[in-house]
Amino acid sequence: MAEPVYPVSIKGVLVREGRVLLVRNERSEWELPGGRIELPETPEDCVAREIAEETGLQVDVAEILDSWVYYIAVARKNVFIVTYGCVTGSDQAPVLSHEHNRLGEFAEHEVADLRMPDGYRRSIAAWFDRLRTLQPTE
């Protein structure tokens, strides 16, 4: 029996001023910016490139957050998703690319009500938790 083969998509969780950056796809789902890895790039290079292409923002990739296989029902295919926490020093506004129909920045409590795969919600929650532990206490 043949081993399953999945496309690999590398996504980034970018929180700026307490809000996570999301893009909306053609299925009207909110998702993390990112996309397919291209050989010979590393996953970290991939997510930085994809975020720049999709939003115009330059990011530093901090750490891996999660991975899972996501079944896209309308496409009838599985995609292997890997998420990374990302940071940026830029205060420029993100720019919507042609790949998505909307771009938004959402507070942590707003994410629960958005239409998106649960894996993205998990990754967003994990990065908000991690960022809280990285903040110096006063």
Image (cartoon, rainbow, N blue to C red):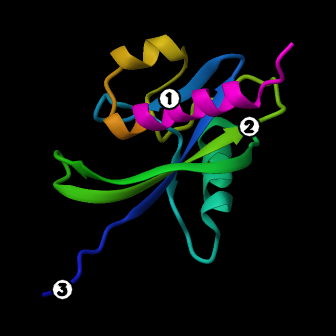
| Spatial separation of the CA atoms under disc 3 and disc 2 | 39 Å
Q: Are marks 1 and 3 in contact (CB under 8 Å)?
A: no
Q: Earlier in the sequence, mark 1 or mark 3?
A: 3
Disc 1 versus disc 2: nearer the observer: 1
Crowd rating for badge 3 (residues with CA inside 10 Å; few <14, some 14–19, many 20+): few
* Kind of residue at disc 3: Ala
In three-dimensional space, the C-alpha distance between marks 1 and 3, rounded to whole angstroms, equals: 36 Å
Q: Front-most of 119 and 39?
A: 119
Confirm whether residue 92 shows in the render. Answer: yes
Q: Distance between the residues labelled 1 and 2?
A: 15 Å
Front: mark 1 or 3: 1
**x and y percentages locating residue 92 in the rendered image:** 79, 25
Residue for badge 2: 87
Is 133 part of what is drawn in magenta?
yes
Mark 3 lies on residue:
2
Mark 2 falls on what kind of element? strand
Figure quadrant of the C terminus: top right
Q: What element carries label 1?
A: helix
Q: Which residue is drawn at 64% across and 70% down?
A: 41
The stretch in magenta equals 121-138
**Residue 114 image-quadrant placement:** top left
